[in-house]
Amino acid sequence: MAANPDLATALLLSHQHTLNAPICLSGIGLHTGQTVEVTLHPAPIDAGRYFVRTDLSSGPIVIPACIDALHQTVLSTELIAQGATVRTVEHLLAALAGLGIDNVRIEVCGPEIPLLDGSAREWVQAIFATGWTSQAELRNSPIVGCPIAVQKGDAFVMAVPAEETRLTYGIDFPHPAIGRQWCSVRGAEFATEIAPARTFGFAEEVDKLRARGLIKGGSLENALVCGTEGWLNPPLRYPDEPVRHKLLDLVGDLSLMGTLPKAHILAYKASHALHTQFVRRLVQLQ
């Protein structure tokens, strides 16, 4: 099969894909504050995307990147298998799914995927540098045949039939620096329009979250922080970078169903919890 097709072709082709060679990156976890090394390995046909905790005294434990392995969604997406967990998986999984990498073994020597710069840009750059290869088996691409939606209050995630994957997101925050933002992109635009968008938070929430044992590894180097007077660490990569990061989180959570569905997916004021509830609904209907 052909090696390293362009991104748009990789997403449209019906065959599965894997990496050409291993990729290794390391960094600090957002919530644990621990330095962790991650190595991505090519994987065979139908292996899917899966994590392997290599640091456990009981030996390596495989944690599949699927909705059935979902553990919790407090400020990140966490997976679990045989009592072993891996947290903040959404940015890495978004990079893989957004680039059409179906089969990959993800070895991690700790409980959390490193945040890197707060986006998926470094993962995407590393994957492009290594390249990927199509495999001799068809990809099972979910198709949405009728509108599907989940809702909580005024927040929702829904999908309507479409000929290609399109993602639309809306957010609405009282902070003037953010306010109301909408962004809509095609799936094939992931690398340029979604992947570089960094995670964001609010200065007034930092102490409360750290008191709960969260964001121990967060800093102005790996997250946009918004204060009452505006951004503490400009400039932004896009004028609407916050909503684009929500699109990144959405892609990562959608990856738990395997292949991104062929549909127009719209979300508004949603969360990891609502994203993954939507994924469960889609999987039930396949």
Image (cartoon, grey):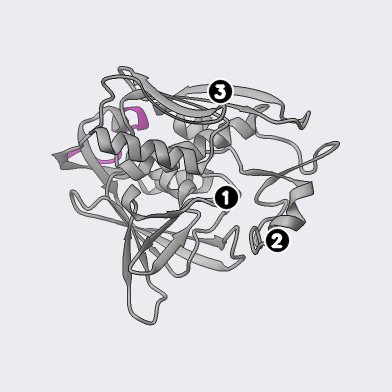
- Specify the quadrant that holds the N terminus: top left
As measured in the structure, the alpha-carbon distance from the residue carrying label 2 to the one carrying label 3 is: 31 Å
The structure residue drawn at horizontal position 51% and vertical position 21%, both measured from the top left corner, is 184
Q: Quadrant of residue 7?
A: top left
Q: In the rendered structure, which segment of residues is drawn in magenta?
A: 1-8
As measured in the structure, the alpha-carbon distance from the residue carrying label 3 to the one carrying label 1 is: 21 Å
Rendered image: mark on residue 210: 2
In the rendered image, the residue lying farthest to the left is 136
Q: Is residue 260 left or right of residue 208?
A: left
| Nearest to N terminus: mark 3 or mark 1 | 1
Q: Is residue 57 left or right of residue 179?
A: left
Which of discs 2 and 3 lies nearer the camera? The answer is 2
Kindly report the secondary structure that dominates the magenta region of the rendered protein.
Answer: loop
Q: Is residue 66 visible?
A: no
In the rendered image, the residue lying farthest to the front is 153
- What residue sits right under mark 1 in the picture? 75
Percent x, y of residue 110: 47, 69
- Considering the numbered disc 1 on the image, is that residue within a helix, a strand or a loop? loop
> Who is closer to the viewer here, 159 or 218?
159
Q: Quadrant of residue 53?
A: bottom left
